[in-house]
């Protein structure tokens, strides 16, 4: 009998739907004992999000400051597994606070040390650099990272920015005015995530994960969009400056924090609607000269190694 654990946190339920579909064939296999563990925060985040609280999560998200968790003495975390599947979402270009808190908790090391780990990401579309941060923590804890599957909103960036805000602030995943597409990851992609479960099942049964990521890639586990990667990298630098500044300047000064976060929200809107299109034009102009590098980056970020 093989034991597999899926760790997750989700606000809307989207990530759990994805994780369940990806482990569909493990669930029905008689040789596998599949368990799910939900990350629980002592003080949870609201969903739907009030506007202020949404931006209030920014500095600690970006700076990867953990929050206190509960249920860390759950017996599910005390066992050794043949495979651990860690599913997470991205908040502000960084692993979400609940997932990051789990990655930095005392529970993680014994769970993943010398154990095959697969990561599942359910994001809007900007996840690559956040995953590098996760990889660093996984490698630091001696995990054997053998796979990564990413589901994202496939609509153009500016459309998904609008629809995700509406979803996060209303809590309802539905089409805005009947004109915009449904927010988040499409129902079809969530359903098709079942296709990933067979290669994972085969690997678990054989206790061999050598070619797993290549098999997953051949059926569409990862789709890297070079322009989003360029944006992600630039935004990391700017987010870092904002997050550090807000954190340093507003300790014990909630009014000032509120004001600076307000400026940050305006800046973000400006960056999305004004700076990003300019960066896109520069990106197009330099496109022919960056082909070799783009190919290399695509290959690196599609695999599980850490630079
Ligand atoms: C505070 C916050 C910040 C987010 N920032 C990003 C981001 O930087 N990149 C991204 O691709 N998605 C981002 N998302 C979307 C999430 O990754 C995720 O897809 C969505 O919240 C649904 O996840 P759920 O399963 O927890 O409901 C953000 C969501 C929230 C709530």
Image: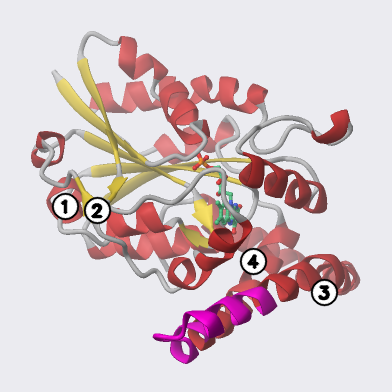
Q: Please tell me which residue is depicted at 69% across the width and 63% down the height of the picture.
A: 294
Q: Are marks 3 and 2 in contact (CB under 8 Å)?
A: no
In this rendering, position of residue 257 left or right of residue 202? right
Element class at badge 4: helix
Q: Residue furthest front?
A: 255
- x and y percent of residue 272 in the render? 78, 66
Which of the marked residues, 1 or 3, is nearer the chain's N terminus?
1
Say if residue 133 shows up in the picture.
yes
Q: Is residue 247 magenta?
A: yes
Which of the marked residues, 4 or 3, is nearer the chain's N terminus?
4
Q: CA distance from mark 4 to mark 1?
A: 30 Å
Instruction: State the mark number for residue 107.
Output: 1
Mark 2 highlights which residue?
69
**Crowd tier of the residue under label 3, counting other residues whose Cα lies within 10 Å: few below 14, some 14–19, many 20 or above:** some
Q: Which residues are magenta?
A: 246-263
Which of the marked residues, 2 or 4, is nearer the chain's N terminus?
2
């Amino acid at each position: 009998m093989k034991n597999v654990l899926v760790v997750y946190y989700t606000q809307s339920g989207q990530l759990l739907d994805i994780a369940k579909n990806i482990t569909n064939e493990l669930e029905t296999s008689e040789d596998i004992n599949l368990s799910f563990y939900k990350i629980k925060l002592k003080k949870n985040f609201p969903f739907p999000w009030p506007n202020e609280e949404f931006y209030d999560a920014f500095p600690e998200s970006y700076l990867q400051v953990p929050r206190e968790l509960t249920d860390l003495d759950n017996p599910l975390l005390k066992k050794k597994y043949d495979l651990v599947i860690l599913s997470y979402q991205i908040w502000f270009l960084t692993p979400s606070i609940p997932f990051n808190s789990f990655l930095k908790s005392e529970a993680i090391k014994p769970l993943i040390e010398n154990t095959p780990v697969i990561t599942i990401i359910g994001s809007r579309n900007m996840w690559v650099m956040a995953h590098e941060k996760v990889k660093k923590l996984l490698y630091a804890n001696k995990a054997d990272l053998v796979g990564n599957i990413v589901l994202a909103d496939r609509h153009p960036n500016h459309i998904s920015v609008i629809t995700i805000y509406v979803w996060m602030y209303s809590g309802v995943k539905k089409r805005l005015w009947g004109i915009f597409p449904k927010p988040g990851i499409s129902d079809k992609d969530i359903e098709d995530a079942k296709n990933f479960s067979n290669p994972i099942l085969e690997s678990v049964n054989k206790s061999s994960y050598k070619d797993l990521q290549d098999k997953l890639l051949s059926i569409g586990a990862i789709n890297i969009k070079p322009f989003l990667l360029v944006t992600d990298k630039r935004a990391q630098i700017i987010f870092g400056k904002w997050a550090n500044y807000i954190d340093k300047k507003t300790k014990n000064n909630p009014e000032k924090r509120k004001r600076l976060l307000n400026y940050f929200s305006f800046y973000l809107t400006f960056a999305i609607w004004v700076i990003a299109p300019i960066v896109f034009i520069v990106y197009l102009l330099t496109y022919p000269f960056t082909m070799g590098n783009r190919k290399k980056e695509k290959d690196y970020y599609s695999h599980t190694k850490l630079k």
